[in-house]
Image: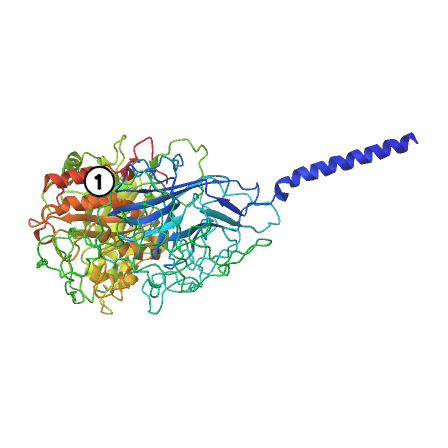
């Protein structure tokens, strides 16, 4: 009997212990993983109101407003189960009111110390790389961003929402809103139970999981009871092989992408006509002036001012009044309201409550008293859409000073005729159209070093309260902010390094990037160029620009012996002198020299092949610190040519995409503000989205650079330069993919024009103020180093 009792006790004890161990081992896996995480803090800032806090507002604003940039900030505290990785992670924003811009971008914010009650444009953290983008319909109820490759483990994550338009801004539902048809910003997770634990990737390494390919849609809704899906698949990352890598940004016509549009639709297609009461470009003020008026629901809002009507000046609002009701503009293809399991339906079939009752959703009214009207026409020298193609010569401004001119007639440059190129005082030595490659090419170079896309590694802060510096990271991409640089003393006999130091003295700021031009068979970098990279307190980055001479692009790609011999010498020189990463481009602004005739040796495809040959050749010769830059001229008549997209050499040999663009101070082509210069439009191709928007969709994983930019001074409008620099400072954050700006300063460049920053005292002062923008506070020197 005693032995039986002992045996029973041991059996019970062992069973209990085994159960406890098993439960302990499975505790983490049996805990249901999170399906949704609401935003912890949210707010927005407006650059033209640098001291205003909007953390208590019921909506978030993102996009162009009042000549500046509205940026929405989101913070999430994420806890994920150990040993599990989500299949998909989505960040959702619900439209509060008004219409949505055609492109919305989501950027990482490395510094998470901000708080919604105190953040202002003057104290806001700097933006990191763009991690996702979307092209929503104007009346979509929700926008979803694929953030799978960002959120890979537990931690605190912060994001910024922007839209790259001067006069368009989105208004999203904030956490403080109540009674809206959508909820606060939310992250949703889609989980696949793994057969065995899946460990997260290393903290400092990029995620091996690619971003979503077109056609993938969220299966988890952000707010219980809703069945919303985004009408546009977010377009970040590498498309699947079945989808064209570079779909044309030009729509083929027809209605645009409204709710429910097919993901195969062109990302730049504009939606069909807005419902009654909505005008193209309608946008709300980011700051309310009072509660929404008592209007019947649901009826369309009264037509607002037509696009282009001038608003009254808007003073900085403070304090903020009570919550305006969200609008209920109809979607051309209304989405169903799908309640979740066990949840009561609250769909539109329910009678609408009377105005003033809880849950009432009156339409978005016309601008409230004290609010500016949507989409003004700016009678100042910054028209919203002035851009049409230029003639290569100067524009005769027939309008009175200060008035925008009518669209000039688009020039039709003949094939092979050059357009303006400020950095190239004369045409390069033209190769013979029939230049034939040598019969004995050098041995083919080995496989190229793969180019690396901007960082996509997880970014939660280990210590959310620790300061975060912006440093130069992989492939010279700053972890936040943008690189600041100059091509000094152009078209002068002045020593370029002396010109660099003089430029820094006048601007009161050291330059990170120094842009140097080389031709033919000269070896670079020079001894002087090397010297400026070796300052231990301020490590400058060289941008080395090489233009070959006396050989066609086709000849280079075919293995021209003289070019190969030069590349041998150049590679040996670089390896023996420069160890830091450097920017490199071959034959910048190639559009100017394209001869589209087959067999010319100078077609767009010939250029792409030559660029590839040179970059892979130098890397095969051991120049592994080369960061390649594809540098377009961005002269609008070239941008809309049939061959334009054939210039691109390929993602594997391009690290950055740059373009050279200038602002003009006389009415006509290029006359406007910074946003106009970034997205200059075409007179002949109304569907050309502007260079930034085209590049953002064509190269979503590439950082962008202004390889050259400047403002041409005008004696008849001398104050325009200062106003332009002011607009650049206020609008910079509309374009978060822009990670480097290199000013081209010359007293006599294009047709004798001057881009000197000190032509007027006001111009110099404005440029100095722009130089002090926090985005350019990049830590360099030995304390920062470079991530190779």
**Dot 1: what SS?**
helix
Q: How many marks?
A: 1
Q: Is residue 507 left or right of residue 270?
A: left
Q: Residue 525, relative to residue 361: is it above or below?
A: above
Q: Nearer the viewer, residue 502 or 482?
A: 482
Q: Nearer the viewer, residue 643 or 230?
A: 230
Residue 430 visible (yes or no): yes
Q: Where, quadrant-wise, is the C terminus in this rendering? A: top left
Residue 782: x and y in percent read 32, 31
Q: Residue at x 66, y 39 (%)?
A: 25
Q: Where, quadrant-wise, is the N terminus in this rendering? A: top right
Residue 7: x and y in percent read 86, 34
| Colour convention | rainbow
Q: Nearer the viewer, residue 421 or 530?
A: 421
Residue that extends furthest to the right in the rendered view of this protein: 1
Q: Is residue 328 left or right of residue 694?
A: right
Residue 739 visible (yes or no): no
Q: Residue 305, relative to residue 49: is it above or below?
A: below
The residue indicated by pointer 1 is 770
Q: Nearer the viewer, residue 46 or 91?
A: 46
Residue 437: x and y in percent read 25, 63
Q: Characterize the local packing of mark 1: few (<14), some (14-19) or many (20 or more) Cα atoms within 10 angstroms.
A: many
């Amino acid at each position: 009997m005693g032995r039986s009792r002992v045996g029973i006790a041991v059996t019970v004890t062992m069973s209990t212990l085994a159960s406890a161990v098993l439960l302990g081992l499975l505790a983490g896996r049996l805990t249901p993983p999170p399906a949704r995480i609401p935003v912890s803090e949210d707010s927005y800032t407006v650059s033209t109101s640098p001291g205003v806090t909007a953390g208590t507002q019921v909506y978030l604003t993102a996009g162009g407003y009042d000549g500046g940039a509205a940026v929405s900030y989101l913070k999430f505290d994420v806890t994920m189960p150990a040993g599990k990785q989500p299949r998909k992670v989505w960040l959702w924003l619900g439209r509060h009111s008004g219409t949505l811009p055609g492109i919305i971008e989501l950027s990482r914010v490395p510094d998470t110390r901000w708080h919604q009650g105190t953040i202002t444009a003057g104290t806001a953290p700097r933006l990191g790389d763009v991690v996702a983008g979307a092209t929503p319909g104007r009346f979509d109820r929700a926008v979803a961003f694929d953030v799978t490759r960002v959120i890979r483990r537990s931690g605190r994550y912060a994001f910024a929402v922007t839209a790259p338009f001067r006069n368009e801004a989105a208004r999203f539902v904030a956490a403080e809103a109540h009674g809206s048809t959508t909820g606060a910003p939310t992250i949703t997770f889609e989980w696949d139970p793994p057969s065995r634990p899946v460990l997260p990737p290393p903290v400092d390494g990029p995620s091996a999981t690619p971003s979503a390919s077109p056609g993938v849609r969220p299966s988890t809704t952000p707010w219980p009871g809703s069945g919303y899906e985004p009408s546009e698949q977010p377009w970040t990352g590498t498309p699947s092989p079945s989808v064209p890598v570079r779909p044309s940004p030009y729509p083929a016509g027809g209605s645009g992408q409204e709710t429910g549009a097919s993901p195969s639709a062109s990302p730049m297609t504009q939606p069909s006509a807005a419902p009654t009461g909505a005008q193209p470009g309608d946008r709300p003020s980011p700051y309310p002036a009072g509660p929404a008026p008592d209007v019947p629901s649901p009826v369309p809002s009264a037509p607002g001012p037509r696009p282009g009507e001038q608003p009254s000046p808007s003073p900085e609002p403070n304090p903020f009044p009570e919550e305006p009701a969200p609008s209920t503009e109809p979607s051309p293809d209304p989405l169903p309201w799908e309640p979740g399991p066990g949840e009561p339906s609250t769909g539109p079939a329910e009678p609408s409550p009377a105005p003033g009752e809880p849950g009432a959703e009156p339409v978005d009214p016309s601008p409230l008293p004290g609010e500016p009207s949507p989409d003004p026409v700016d009678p100042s020298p910054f028209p919203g859409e002035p851009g049409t193609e230029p003639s290569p010569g100067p524009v005769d401004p027939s309008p009175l000073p200060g008035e925008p001119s009518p669209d000039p007639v688009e020039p039709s440059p003949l094939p092979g005729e050059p357009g303006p190129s400020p950095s190239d005082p004369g045409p390069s030595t033209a190769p013979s159209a029939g230049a034939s490659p040598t019969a004995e090419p050098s041995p083919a170079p080995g496989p190229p070093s793969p180019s690396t896309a901007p960082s996509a590694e997880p970014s939660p802060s280990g210590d959310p309260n620790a300061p975060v510096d912006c440093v130069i990271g992989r492939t010279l991409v700053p972890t936040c902010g943008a690189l600041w640089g100059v091509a000094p003393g152009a078209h002068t006999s002045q020593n370029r390094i002396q010109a660099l130091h003089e430029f820094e003295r006048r601007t009161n700021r050291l330059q990170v990037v120094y842009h140097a031009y080389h031709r033919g068979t000269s070896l670079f970098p020079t001894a002087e160029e090397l010297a400026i990279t070796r300052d231990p307190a301020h490590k400058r980055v060289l941008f080395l620009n090489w233009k070959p001479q006396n050989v066609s692009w086709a000849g280079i790609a075919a293995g021209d012996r003289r070019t190969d011999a030069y590349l041998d010498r150049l590679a040996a020189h670089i390896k023996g002198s420069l160890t830091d990463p450097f920017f490199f481009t071959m034959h910048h602004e190639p559009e100017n020299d394209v001869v589209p005739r087959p067999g010319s040796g100078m077609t767009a495809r010939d250029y792409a092949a030559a660029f590839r040959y040179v970059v892979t050749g130098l890397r095969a010769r051991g120049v592994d610190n080369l960061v390649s830059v594809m540098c377009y001229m961005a002269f609008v008549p070239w941008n809309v040519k049939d061959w334009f997209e054939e210039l691109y050499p390929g993602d594997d040999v391009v690290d950055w995409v740059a373009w050279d663009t200038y602002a003009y101070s006389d009415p006509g082509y290029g006359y406007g503000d910074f946003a106009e210069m970034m997205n200059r439009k075409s007179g002949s191709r109304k569907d050309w989205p502007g260079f930034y928007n085209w590049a953002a969709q064509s190269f979503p994983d590439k950082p962008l650079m202004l390889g050259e930019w400047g403002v041409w001074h005008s004696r008849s409008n001398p104050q325009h330069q200062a106003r332009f620099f002011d607009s650049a400072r206020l609008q910079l954050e509309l374009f978060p993919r822009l990670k480097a700006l290199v000013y081209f300063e010359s007293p006599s460049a294009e047709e004798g024009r001057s881009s000197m920053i000190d032509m007027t005292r006001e111009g110099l002062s404005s440029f100095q103020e722009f130089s002090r923008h926090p985005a350019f506070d990049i830590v360099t020197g030995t304390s920062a180093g470079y991530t190779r």
